[in-house]
Image (cartoon, helix red, strand yellow):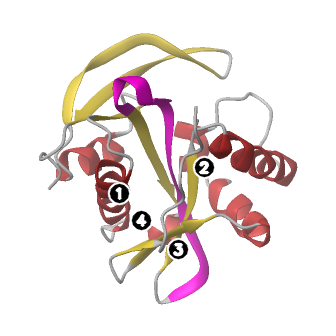
Amino acid sequence: MPALPLPDPPLTDGVVLLRPRRAGDIPQRFRAFADPLCLRFSWPLTEPLTERHVRERFVQEEPARLRGEEVCLAVVDARETGRIWGGASVYDTVRSEGRLGVGYWLAPEARGRGNATRTLRLLAGWAFDCLAVQRLELTCAPDNTASQQVARRCGFLREGVLRSHIPFRDGRRDTVLFGLLPGELV
């Protein structure tokens, strides 16, 4: 599968900027993702998150992009581009079927101001325009109501619950599935 492109130029709406992650982001990324809410919904392991985990994940991202599997981006304050607000990605690519997954997370100081909605709109618009996908899928935990609200604000439709969908901590977790088709992004 061919490599996935990086957004060029980086994606922005003047408030949020989505750019490639950098090695220098790792300490901020670790501090932001170590927030209890991020860990509750996005950290599947039972062991505590460490900066080593974040560093190892960073090393894996570019080879995965080159294999055509995912694109991981830093979500930053567009007015202060060194300040990490979170992360966003396209992943679970099935390009032969024209679909892929989208995901995002935000640090506590970036929440509650529409930044997740802005991030998802930028990411989804780029995926439809530049990656020519015909379907985006967004998944989240059933009790992650904030993420579900963001999905709905962007036009994603709730399609159902995937029972016992993914390994998570000491067991498995259900997942709510949302879908978005071209022309539905709001």
Residue 92: in magenta span:
yes
Left or right side of 107 for 96: left
Q: Residue at x 83, y 49 (%)?
A: 50
Q: Residues within 10 Å of mark 4 (few under 14, many from 20)?
A: some
**Which residue is farthest bottom?**
79
Q: What whole-number distance in Å separates the C-alpha atoms at marks 2 and 1?
A: 30 Å
Q: CA distance from mark 3 to mark 1?
A: 17 Å
Q: Position of residue 94 (x, y in %)?
A: 45, 26
Q: Nearer the viewer, residue 177 or 65?
A: 65
Labels 2, 4: front one: 4
Mark before the other along the chain sequence, 3 or 1: 3
For discs 1 and 4, the disc positioned in front in the rendered view: 1
Q: Amino acid at mark 2?
A: Pro
Q: Point out the stretch of residues depicted in magenta.
A: 80-99
Q: CA distance from mark 3 to mark 2?
A: 20 Å
What amino acid is at disc 4?
Arg
Q: CA distance from mark 2 to mark 4?
A: 13 Å
> What residue would you read off at disc 1?
126
- The residue where tag 2 is placed is 36
* 130 horizontally vs 7: left or right: left
Q: Earlier in the sequence, mark 3 or mark 4?
A: 3
Of badges 2 and 1, nearer the viewer stands 1
Q: Which residue is mark 3?
A: 76
Q: Upstream in the sequence, badge 2 or badge 4? A: 2
In the rendered image, which residue does mark 4 sit on?
111
Disc 1 residue type (three-letter): Trp
Query: What percent of the width, then of the height, locates residue 14?
Result: 35, 83
